Amino acid sequence: MNPIEFFSKRFEIPSPIELHNEERSQGEWIPITTRPMTEEEEKDACERWGVDHLEDYEKHIFTCQLPADGQEILISTRFGVSLDTCDIDPDYGCGLENNGDWDGVLAWMPLPEPYKVGGEQNEDSQL
């Protein structure tokens, strides 16, 4: 397993209820925020993952809303904006399919709804 895969699989995430506890409007960036793990959370994570200790970069818990598993999103980094897909594993945490992990991600945003002409979905539009 490469370091990016390792890192993405070691993020500790809150419960699904905590992940979606705040509603946001579509088109609004959601900043990535974390907090350090408590000693008890760190011990639980070590037991769950079968390791003796965690690296410093693994000892954080998301405190922000996260996307749903499989949700396509926009992510913003210092290099720009890109499309990615959230990958949540109940045993290992939350990662991203393209970026690998959330390291360096400043914020994320749900994709906008498709453009509609006259209030209706425009599936048969003509150019």
Image (cartoon, helix red, strand yellow):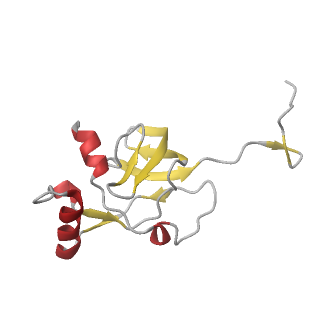
- Looking at the rendering, which quadrant does residue 97 occupy? top left
Which residue sits at x=41%, y=36%?
98
Q: Residue at x 17, y 74 (%)?
A: 39
In the picture, measured across the screen, residue 29 lies left or right of residue 94, that is: right
Q: Quadrant of the C terminus?
A: top right
Q: Position of residue 27 (x, y in %)?
A: 61, 53
Tell which of 42 and 27 is nearer to you.
42
Relative to 90, is 6 above or below?
Answer: above
Residue at x 23% of width, y 71% of height: 41
Q: Position of residue 64 (x, y in %)?
A: 43, 65
**Left of 100 or right of it: where is 19?**
right
Pick the residue in front: 9 or 84: 9
- The outermost residue toward the top is 127
Give coordinates of residue 113: x percent, y percent. Answer: 70, 48
Residue situated furthest left in the rendering: 52
Quadrant of the image containing the N terminus: top left
> Could you tell whether 126 is left or right of 100 in the image?
right
